[in-house]
Image (cartoon, helix red, strand yellow):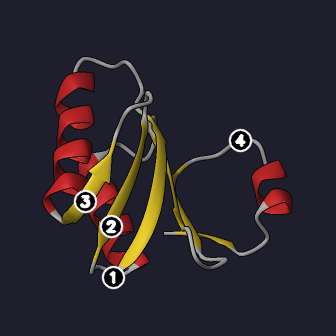
Amino acid sequence: MAVYWISFRVGHEDDYQARYTSLVDGLKSISLKYWEETTSFLVIETDQDIDSIASIANDAVDRTTDLVLVRAMDSKNARLIGIEGDDDIFKLMPYLKYA
């Protein structure tokens, strides 16, 4: 089992609610435990690896308008889904990879 945090921004296009729900429900479906008490942020415990989590996120969102950041809490391992205009994230997290 591993614990991950997921931070995300879903753009406010017409299908916002469908993408938001698809992302959250997809992540919850693979979670043994989850915490979602703050906005657009989840902590999950799962037996899935980080690339499987990134794939679920990728399937739920629109990479041209949405952004998802997934990080393994016990290691320096992270994935970015979507287009990020601020490259500082790669300086702050040099181990970050695009999914």
Residue wearing tag 1:
1
- Please report whichever mark, 2 or 1, sits nearer to the chain's N-terminal start: 1
Numbered label tally: 4
Q: Three-letter amino acid code at disc 2?
A: Glu
Looking at the image, which is closer to me, 23 or 44? 44
Residue wearing tag 3:
33
Distance from label 2 to label 1 (Cα)?
7 Å
**What is the number of the mark on residue 85?**
4
Q: Are marks 2 and 1 in contact (CB under 8 Å)?
A: yes
Q: Three-letter amino acid code at disc 4?
A: Gly
**What is the number of the mark on residue 81?**
none
Q: Residues within 10 Å of mark 4 (few under 14, many from 20)?
A: few
Q: Quadrant of residue 71?
A: bottom right
Q: Quadrant of residue 4?
A: bottom left
Distance from label 3 to label 4 (Cα)?
32 Å
Looking at the image, which is closer to me, 86 or 31? 31
Distance from label 1 to label 3 (Cα)?
11 Å
**What is the number of the mark on residue 45?**
2
Q: Three-letter amino acid code at disc 3?
A: Lys
The residue located at (82%, 58%) in the rendering is 92
Please state which of the two labelled residues, at mark 4 or mark 1, is closer to the viewer.
1
